Structures are given as C-alpha cells and as structure tokens.
Image (spheres, rainbow, N blue to C red):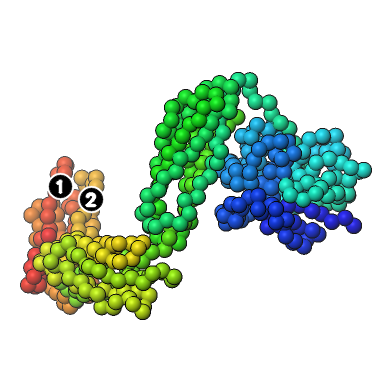
Amino acid sequence: MKKVWFVTAFGILIGGIVVAVGVSLYQRHESEVEIREDIQHHKLESGAYSLLAAFQMLGVKATIGEVFDLIRYATSGDVMERLLQVTKQKYVHCERVKLTVDELKSRRKPVIVKIKDGQFVLIDEFINGQLQIVNSSDPPYLISKGEFEQIWDGEVLILEPLAPEPKAPHIRFDNARHNFGMLRPGQKVSHTFLFRNDGESPLIVSSVKSSCGCIAVLTSKREINPGDVGKIEVTYTSPGGGGRKTTKQIEVCSNDPYYPVTVLTITSITKQVPKSIPASLLFRYGGREAKLKKQIAITIPPGSKKLQVTRIETSSPQIQAKVISDGKTDSQVKISVSVKPDGKLHFTEKLTIHTDHPDVSKIEVPILCEKLESVMVSPSSLLFGMIPTDEALSRHVLISAKGVSKFRIVNVSVKSPYLSTKLITLKEGQEYELKVTVEKNAPKGPLRDKILLKTDISNQPEIS
C-alpha cells in the first residue's frame, strides 16, 4: 500500500509518522522559526506551504514569510477562502470548486486540495492513473486514486497565472516584514520600507495606516511613476513590560488593481529590564488602616547585570526613601519609602530611582497619598430623577465607620420641608442607614438640598 505524503510546517507526515523536512527548506526561509511561533495552526501551515509550491510551479516569486503574512491578514473566510484571496494578490487566477477525481484528471494546472483534518496538499498531474503530489522542497510522490478518495473532501483550488491588467500600476515591496529584534522598554526605533512601481502606469498611494504603537509616513511622492521607488518611514516605540513579543501592521492602500492593500509587518521583543515591584505605591493615613512606611523591590532579570542605586530623588520633602539592600548578591534591591502627611486629603508625588544599569538609568515610581475619613458615606449624593407629583419616593444612604472604632450620629437635619429623613441603626457604633424621602406634596420643578449629619467624632463632627 502506498504512503500518503503532505507538507506541514513541522515535517512530512508519512502514514501518520512524522519525519524531518529537508534542511534546505529551513535554510531558504530564515524567518521560519519566528513565523512558526506566530502560526500554530496546522491548517494555515499546510495551506501556506502548498500555496508556495504552486507559486513556484507557476513561476510566481514568493517567500514562505510573505505567504504566511498574506494568509494571516486576509480579511475573512476559512483557510480555503484566505488562500484564494492571497492568489489574487500575487497575480494568480484561482477558482474554488467541488470536483470528483475523474474531473480532477482533466485539469492541467496546479491544484490545491483539502484533505482530512483540514490539511492541504498540492496535486500537479495524473501519471498512469495515480495522482502526483508536490511540495516545495522534495521530489514528487504518487498516490492511488482509491487512497486519495478516502482522505479528500472534494474541495479544490485551481490556479493559473493571471495576466496583469494592461498598463496597470503594480506595487512591489522588496521586503514587507522587518524585525527590530530585542529592544528596551520605551526604546524608539525606525525603519524604511522601500517599494517600487513594477507596472506600466503611475502608482498612486492613497493612504498609509498604522496600528497603535507605531507611526508610518509616506516620505516619497504620493504618485510613483513606472520603475520609480517610494519610501515609507516607520517609527516605533517598544512597549513596557519585558519579555513580550510585539507585532504591528501597516496597511498601504494604492491603485494597484490586484494588490490594493499591502500589509507591512514589524516585530520586536521587549527586553526584560530591572523594574519596580510594585510599580506604584498607595498610602492611606488618618485612620485605623494608616500605614506610612512601605517597601518596593527593584527586581533584576536573570542573566542581567547587577544593579546599584546611585541616587534617589523625591518630588516632595513629604516623601523619604532609602536603600535597605545593595543588590550585590541578591536579584533585587529593596527600598524603604515613608510618607509624612501634611493634612491634605489627597496628594500625588513621585519617586525617581537612578541606577548604574546599562538598560535602565532611572525608574520612576508614582506615589498616591490619601487621607482616610473617619466615616464613609455611600453614595455621597442622591439622584431621584423624575418623580410623579402624587407619589413619595425614597433612597437609602449607608454610613459606616472607617477610621474610628466607634461613632454615633447625634443629629440629622435638612432644610427643605419636602424632604424627610429616618436614621436606622444597622450595627451600633459601626453602621447606619439613612432613609431619605421626597414627599408626595413636593411642588413641580427641580429640588436640590443638602443633608447635614452631626457626629461625636472630634476630627469629623459634621458630614454633608
């Protein structure tokens, strides 16, 4: 019994056993390891390799990286539909049809077929009643009609070269993908994508759209004559958070009739650098939960140079900080941070830690200070909305101890005669509920008022 051969990105399946693809395939496509990290699904992989083999048979220039990118950024549909979209962008006519094996025999063009589990193979021709299967690196292989019918679902893509529109423009990038490699967080880099008009009439670039995190600008003329070269400058700032791979796309729209949108891709990996844990500090003071001293740790990634803190700056004399470990032997440097509040309810400051590390000269740590009220009121305001004149409507407010162990509400007052209040004790000294009612005899029009609560707390005698 003949074996079934077809290409995946990981190897060639022979009767269910995986063996290695020829080394030459990997050498020709240097970016394959990177691409395989992005594309894990076997359907996309086998479809891409089958399509590349078909392009090679038709004399269409393409690389595996380009084919992968075009499939990934095809706008819609299943894998078969996305393969069809890619063929048009490479000046190849493609039809998606259902055929029998006998009908397949009459076709004299490269045919991509979908078999079991959504995988794809390329059928070149029939030889002595057997189907010839071709991939992009190995010699052709034969499979019998009976064996093929057992694994095929009848769907095919039929490919043939598409004559370009007479005197049409054609945009062509030498390389539509650029890898910036390893970058520090916040590092700003740039790259120039070159393209040329390989067509026979002026190419007009209508727009250049970039995703968040990068800026792409057409720096050449908007109209590119046949044979001339255009430039797109891309400026990119790497994100924070080390160890992450980032991919951004730029869409270049033009009047190329077969390639109206070109997708450019930039990738990078953000290097792990020393950082503060936590990244910010929150101090609450003035009550039982007050804590005016905390610690941060400047963590040093494995394999990174050791770090020394050379200087610490604070944005206010209310903030004090000092190193409590030097980082010579540990993977982190600990810093003690304390706050001396000045009575303000809220204030925001900043700690700047200067280091001798080559990848990060300073680390900024925002500091938020918040004075705790003795009593918390929720909600702090009431909205009744539209009220019928012949109905009363009530709302409830929860009043609870926050910065004191116990408290008492000694009086509740409101000015409007059309508002009434009722204080309900939920937990003596700890929690109360205030019921506020708009009386049914309230006049038409807006009604605004303020409720005043008097307490036995020395530093918060009134709450409004």
Residue 377 lies in quadrant: bottom left
Image coordinates of residue 336 in percent, x first then y, are 24, 74
State the quadrant of the C terminus. bottom left
In space, the residues marked 2 and 1 are separated at their CA atoms by 10 Å
Foreground pick, 341 / 18: 18
Tell me if 76 is positioned left or right of 141 in this view: left
Tag 2–tag 1 contact (CB < 8 Å):
yes
Residue sitting at 56 percent across and 21 percent down? Answer: 201
Q: Secondary structure at mark 2?
A: loop
Image coordinates of residue 102 in percent, x first then y, are 87, 39
Residue sitting at 76 percent across and 57 percent down? Answer: 13
Foreground pick, 37 / 73: 37
Q: Which mark is residue 112?
A: none
Residue sitting at 16 percent across and 41 percent down? Answer: 445
Q: Is residue 432 visible in this depiction of the protein? A: no
Identify the amino acid type marked 1.
Leu
Q: Secondary structure at mark 1?
A: loop
